[in-house]
Image (cartoon, grey):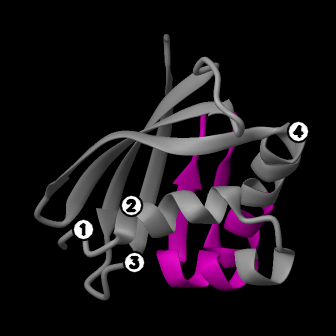
Amino acid sequence: MSDNGFVERYLAVWNEPDPVRRRKAVAEVWHEDALYANTGREFKGHAEIEEAVTEAYDEFVAKGFAFRLHAHAVNHTTARLTWDMAPKDGGDVVARGTEYLAFAPDGRVLTDHQFPEEI
């Protein structure tokens, strides 16, 4: 797996305001059998992952925040992506998290485990 714009596509899903485009983007980023796990719950498959993304959008992005890249690294079929959440119009970072991703042979995410970090 190489980056090839993946990081931008991944973060764009979480910031996408349009539910139809968000649904399409989830299918493009995550494999149909994917697992996304945050500290509160596991989400399996496109419908549940879309639910998780929509919940994050409604709770944070719709209220004026945006997810932005902090750092990332790719290691063969896995990656680490660290994001910051900050006000859309600038300002201090209010949250940071790291995703540990494993990719399916087609390049989409097969497993996505989120770990919040102290900032």
The mark closer to the camera, 2 or 3, is 2
Instruction: State if disc 4 and disc 2 touch (CB < 8 Å).
Output: no
Give the alpha-carbon distance from disc 3 to disc 4, as whole Å: 29 Å
Segment tinted magenta in the rendering: 23-51
Quadrant showing the N terminus: bottom left
Q: Amino acid at mark 3?
A: Arg
The residue at which mark 3 appears reads as 108
Give the alpha-carbon distance from disc 2 to disc 3, as whole Å: 12 Å
Give the alpha-carbon distance from disc 1 to disc 4, as whole Å: 30 Å
The residue at which mark 1 appears reads as 3
Q: Quadrant of residue 61?
A: top right
SS label for mark 4: helix
Q: Earlier in the sequence, mark 3 or mark 4?
A: 4
The label shown at residue 7 is 2
Q: Is residue 33 above or below residue 13?
A: below
At horizontal 67% and vertical 43% (from top left) the residue drawn is: 66
Give the alpha-carbon distance from disc 1 to disc 3, as whole Å: 11 Å
Residue 10: x and y in percent read: 49, 63
Q: Is residue 62 above or below residue 43?
A: above
The mark closer to the camera, 1 or 3, is 1
The residue at which mark 4 appears reads as 63
Relative placement, left or right, of 105 versus 117 is left
Instruction: State if disc 1 and disc 2 touch (CB < 8 Å).
Output: yes
Instruction: State if disc 4 and disc 1 touch (CB < 8 Å).
Output: no
Q: Amino acid at mark 4?
A: Lys
